[in-house]
Image (tube, rainbow, N blue to C red):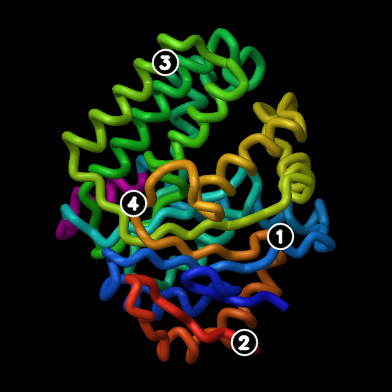
Amino acid sequence: MATCTFGGKHATQITCLCIVLCTAVRHRRSTCVARTGISRGVLVSHEEYNEGYKKRHKARSSYVDIMEMISTRKLYNNPFTISIEGNIGSGKTTFLNHFQNFNATILQEPVDLWRNVAGVNLLDLFYKDPVNYAFLFQSYVHLTRLQLHTMSIPSPYKVMERSIFSAKCFLENMKRTHMIKDVETIVLEKWYDWCLENTKIRSDLIIYLRTTPEIVFQRMQARARKEEDSVPLEYLKQIHEIHEDWLYRQTLFSLPAPVMIIDGDKSLEEMVPQFEKCKDRILNGQTDGTNRIIIDTKV
């Protein structure tokens, strides 16, 4: 059974998120963490995941679609911003789809831009030859994420697949594995710091889809992106540990916003009912005097 906790207890999942938004707005400056244990025994069907992935990508708006939309509507320059964080294959795109009926602009990772930089597939080059292309790829990732963060949108809520903050997780892994040179690390860190200091990057809520590397490896193989053919399980384990240090243990980087941690190993069908059970308890959340939101989520 999934459970839902803020501030270190155990937590649950999805449809009640609109209500969480109301709570998060009131406690933007709080340190709030909703946690769920990882279900180690849950293995998704390759066919189920792959079919769902294709449907999601067919239905979701691209960067170009968003740009066409904002040209004809009222724009919000400082919207309430949620980022969905997690490992490769953790279900971020699936999760994003549940904001479609909410008054939100959904921004997927700009993968299409990474696949076509003046006709060059930079994502593919990075995975196949990271030593030579990691610095170049990460530089472009920083730029494209910054563009999404600073984009005016036609709704008061912005929901992003990852953020400029998570870009630092991948940079951290490049440092740990000596994928890039020390001087390249310094340049990327200075670029990252400059972005935070000189641009208006808003972050109001982080949702961490916490998964096990073995399960996301299965999902990655099922969706069969050609660029990911060469990605080993060991790489997913490295990215997992960095996300754990950042968002679960909270020992790596400072947190720009409250964090909700969700068991991303579960299927969508399992997550939705647990959110429904959690809904009323979130409405009755109380603070404990330490700038945390405490939710009693025993079910």
Q: Does the magenta stretch include residue 74?
A: yes
In the image, residue 101 above or below residue 230: below
**Kind of residue indicated by mark 4:** Pro
Residue to which mark 2 is pinned = 298
Can residue 12 be seen in the rendering of this structure? no
In the image, residue 140 above or below residue 198: above
User: Which quadrant: the C terminus?
Assistant: bottom right
Q: Residue 118 carries which label?
A: 3
Q: Which mark is residue 256?
A: 4
Q: In this picture, which residue range is highlighted in magenta?
A: 65-76
Judge from the rendering whether residue 262 lies leftward or rightward of residue 66; answer left or right: right
Give the mark, 1 or 4, whose residue is nearer the N terminus: 4
**Kind of residue indicated by mark 3:** Ala
Label 1, label 4: how many angstroms apart (C-alpha)? Answer: 25 Å
Q: How crowded is mark 3: few (under 14 residues within 10 Å), some or many (20 or more)?
A: few
The mark closer to the camera, 1 or 4, is 4
Q: What element carries label 1?
A: loop
Q: Do the residues labelled 4 and 2 touch (CB within 8 Å)?
A: no
Label 1, label 3: how many angstroms apart (C-alpha)? Answer: 37 Å
Q: How crowded is mark 1: few (under 14 residues within 10 Å), some or many (20 or more)?
A: many
**Kind of residue indicated by mark 1:** Asp
In the image, residue 93 above or below residue 270: above
Residue lying at 19% horizontally and 48% vertically, measured from the top left: 71
Q: Which mark is residue 265?
A: 1
Q: What element carries label 4?
A: loop
Measured as percent of width and height from the top left, residue 83 is found at 41, 54
Q: Is residue 2 magenta?
A: no
